[in-house]
Amino acid sequence: MNMKHKQVIAGSDKVLVNDIRRMIDEARASVAAMVNAGLTMLYWEIGKRIHQEILKGNRADYGKQILATLSQELSDNYGKGFNYSSLTRMVKFYESFQDEKIVATLSQQLSWSHFRELLPLEKMLQRDFYAEMCRVERWSVRTLRQKLDSMLYERTAISRKPEELIRHEIDSLRNEDQMTPDLVFRDPYFLDFLGLKDRYLEKDMEDAILRELEQFLLEFGAGFSFVARQKRIQVDNDDYYLDLLFFHRKLRRLVAIELKLGDFKPADKGQMELYLRWLDKYERQSGEEKPVGLILCAGKKQETIKLLEIEKSGIRVAEYMTELPPRKVLEQKLHKAIEQARQEFRNRIEPTAGKDDEPTC
């Protein structure tokens, strides 16, 4: 290309070049998405067909024989993408996601690599939770791995509910893209990326959060937008300052966050209630839901939380961790919290059910 042509492109035709580049990039992305969806559905269909064939046999080793023979034939013709382990994974894929319509919808956003990360999960509710959150929040494969490693499902409030209620919320998310606070908020939050060691002040934590805002929002989940720090709240002649204020697009509401270095105290509830009522009166816009509050603290006592019935005020209390514990310790803590929450729910329901069953005179 001579100098004259370069000058023309560098001038008036630069917009044209950028437009065509955009068209090419969009077309490539569209083709890649179609190929991915097609391959994912192919693997599902193969898994289904093999599964049906295996069911015809009565011997325990029948399935292994089929997979061994089939993988040899297909590998010779189509390469290692259809070897024994790959075919086994396809069968697992079908067994884990048996609804074709759901798979077809998910495959528009999730790649085969996403599904491979989900297959080791044994519980259906866990798989469905991660699959739908991945679809809605458009996680990359790397982000999905991080969410799995951090036990997001066990940390999310929804996991504390009975299974039938969890299923209802996941189905609402799948069918209506309806995001609820129990899908958004979690406990505990991992803030190890802030780099806080030993002694620090609330201001140090705020500074670190704003410095690492991208990581902070990744931990909190998609949909959060930063609004203000040290939001001034004036009541009568007194000034109060809310630590952090966010807006959540899916929930369509403001989220007020207070940071506490120590354990949660009953007075923290009254403070947050004041902030939420002020925000509801002066900051809430038309079409928005009522603001909610999140108190992040170093620790909390369960009986105190229960007696205050804090969630009735639209407030969540969650612990934060600036240093991650060993995974085994974390697993034990989360599983214990889930079981306690479900037992409390059963205790609330059973007395009511008993009263309803009493004969009337």
Image (cartoon, rainbow, N blue to C red):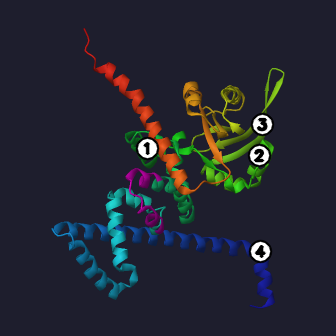
Q: Earlier in the sequence, mark 4 or mark 2?
A: 4
Residue for badge 2: 206
- Could you tell me the amino acid type at mark 3? Lys
**Residue shown at 61% from the left, 44% from the top:** 249
- Could you tell me the amino acid type at mark 4? Ser
Q: Earlier in the sequence, mark 1 or mark 4?
A: 4
Residue 200 at what x, y percent from top left?
79, 46
Describe the element under mark 3 as helix, strand or loop: strand
For marks 1 and 3, give the CA distance: 34 Å
Q: Is residue 138 visible in this depiction of the protein? A: no
Q: Earlier in the sequence, mark 4 or mark 3?
A: 4
Q: Nearer the viewer, mark 1 or mark 3?
A: 3
- Could you tell me the amino acid type at mark 1? Ser
Describe the element under mark 4 as helix, strand or loop: loop
Q: Is residue 140 magenta?
A: no
Q: Earlier in the sequence, mark 1 or mark 3?
A: 1
Q: Is residue 128 magenta?
A: yes
Q: Nearer the viewer, mark 1 or mark 4?
A: 1
Q: Which residues are magenta?
A: 113-129
Describe the element under mark 1 as helix, strand or loop: helix
Residue for badge 1: 172
Q: Nearer the viewer, mark 4 or mark 3?
A: 3
Foreground of the two, 204 or 291: 204
